[in-house]
Image: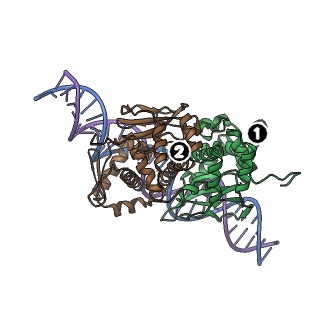
Chain colours: A green, B brown, C purple, D blue
Amino acid sequence: MTTVSPPSRITTLVEKLSLRDQVAPDEIEALKDVLDPPREIRSGADIVKEHSHPLHSTLLISGFSARYSSLADGARQITELNVPGDFIDLHSLLMKQMDHGVVALTDCVVASAPHAKLIRLTERHPHLTRLLWLDTIIDAAIHRQWLVAMGRRSGLGHLAHLVCELYLRLQAVGQASGKADGMRFNLPLTQATLGDALGLSTVHVSRLVTELRGEGVVSWSGGQVEILNWHRLAEIAEFDATYLRLQNEPV
Amino acid sequence: MTTVSPPSRITTLVEKLSLRDQVAPDEIEALKDVLDPPREIRSGADIVKEHSHPLHSTLLISGFSARYSSLADGARQITELNVPGDFIDLHSLLMKQMDHGVVALTDCVVASAPHAKLIRLTERHPHLTRLLWLDTIIDAAIHRQWLVAMGRRSGLGHLAHLVCELYLRLQAVGQASGKADGMRFNLPLTQATLGDALGLSTVHVSRLVTELRGEGVVSWSGGQVEILNWHRLAEIAEFDATYLRLQNEPV
DNA sequence: CGCGCGCGATAACATGGGTTAAACCTTCAC
DNA sequence: GTGAAGGTTTAACCCATGTTATCGCGCGCG
């Protein structure tokens, strides 16, 4: 995990933002200044509680987490999966009260940024503010794609779409191997968790994973996913990556 | 439509923002300065085209519009309904390319704000910027609630949730009659459109509307909706208004 | 070394919501 | 007043996905 120079706690965030627009040195400094020291969260623990009023926003440094809402009958709907480099509750800066919770799906490392410091950042760094704003806008775009998949795609298309999305988001922060050398990534989530994300039962998720495997589109076992045929997978998903905004276009 | 002093084009927007935090006079001026003169859009026309690269963001002044995505088989999924006072593509300011389209569901009046002016606004008015940012954050919160409804609620619960949401959003901008005096609002949308929003077929929407009516929870005909039993309706929907953020909490 | 448990696969059966079709109603143009 | 067009309702039938249940595998722990 540590080489000559250990990755700073904002490496993945800056890596992601830099894909979209240049991040100036003083902006990187400002981001560092705003964050408290990293801390660890155990798999299964809430990082942010439903209905709470956070006084800081939290950056996911490593691991997977998920936004979720609980229902009266005990069911759960996951509304977004978070990957390293995601600000998991930046919206609480302005929303004040959480409309959902965030749970660690694996052991995670996170760092918090006090709201007071973030507000000061928005007063002094309008361009960096726009980059952070953009990050929350992309959350909304991801939600919309999930809505389309849930409302109008088949279960298989929906699962395929999720796999495409996760691959590109993980690749953007160096957590997936490149196209040349086998499109592989670690996805240590249970099928029950995937079902909560897709709005499907665990039985049906199992059927769908088996089907994708059977078609020779992915190999998937032990939490390791390899995309064997991106073209086919994207076709099944009707995938269009625009919404992830991994293009450099200055804001 | 016009009385002594005709409502300015930003009345509904300012009304909505003011519910959340005080909007200063110079901020209201800044908003006015940023907007081009209003223009009319015919029902059924695109206000913003899918995949376009807008150079301005558009405010909905009157009428209903919808964000939507089209699928290969001709199906459509609506991901949000817009009411007067909504900035319908504010995210394009930073997203650059549209990941979806916006269509007028009724005749609409809109006003556009050039991106160059909006960027200048973010440089000069950090607090107003946060209010606009918050508006896009609430879009994301609405998306999440729709995801929960689509993934884990019954069709009836989902429809009931949509009715609750629309009532509160319309009431916030003075487009629905108050609780004391009959909770009524105009909703001139076809059941096919509602189906595209709910991810259901028009036949099933008809069954569900009939069921809500039969339970005596709403009266609904000719595009007029009246909520006869808010308590029952909110119960069916498991509705919690937190996500609409209609509380005054300074940002 | 073996037991228990979480996870995934499979099977049998149930059902909410889709599809197709037809009847009916309302509005509006002429 | 009549016909056409668009919207809603109802009915019959179908299928994707849910539910319940069982089995098997792999791994951690006693």
Front residue (pair A211, A76)? A76
Image location of residue B183, percent across then percent down: 30, 56
Q: In this view, does B57 lie to the left or right of A217?
A: left
Q: Mark 2 points at which residue?
A: A144
Q: Is residue C30 left or right of residue A201?
A: left
What's the amino acid at mark 1? Gly
Q: Can residue B79 be seen in this view?
A: no
Mark 2 and mark 1: span between their CA atoms? 27 Å
Give the class, few, some or many, for how many residues have Cα within 10 Å of label 2's Cα (few <14, many ≥20): many
Farthest residue, direction front: B26
Q: Which image quadrant is residue B188 in? A: top left
Image location of residue B165, percent across then percent down: 41, 53
Helix, strand or loop at label 2? It is helix
What's the amino acid at mark 2? Arg
Front residue (pair B244, B189)? B244
The disc, 2 or 1, on the residue closer to the chain's N-terminal end is 2
**Mark 2 or mark 1, which is nearer to you?**
2
Helix, strand or loop at label 1? It is loop
Give the class, few, some or many, for how many residues have Cα within 10 Å of label 1's Cα (few <14, many ≥20): some
> Compared with residue C12, is residue C6 higher up or lower down, i.e. above or below?
below
Image location of residue A224, percent across then percent down: 73, 50
Q: Which image quadrant is residue A203 in? A: bottom right
Chain ID at mark 2:
A
Image location of residue B72, percent across then percent down: 51, 33
Farthest residue, direction right: A4
Image disc number at residue A178 = 1
Where is the C terminus of chain A found, in terms of image quarters? top right
Q: Is residue B248 visible?
A: yes
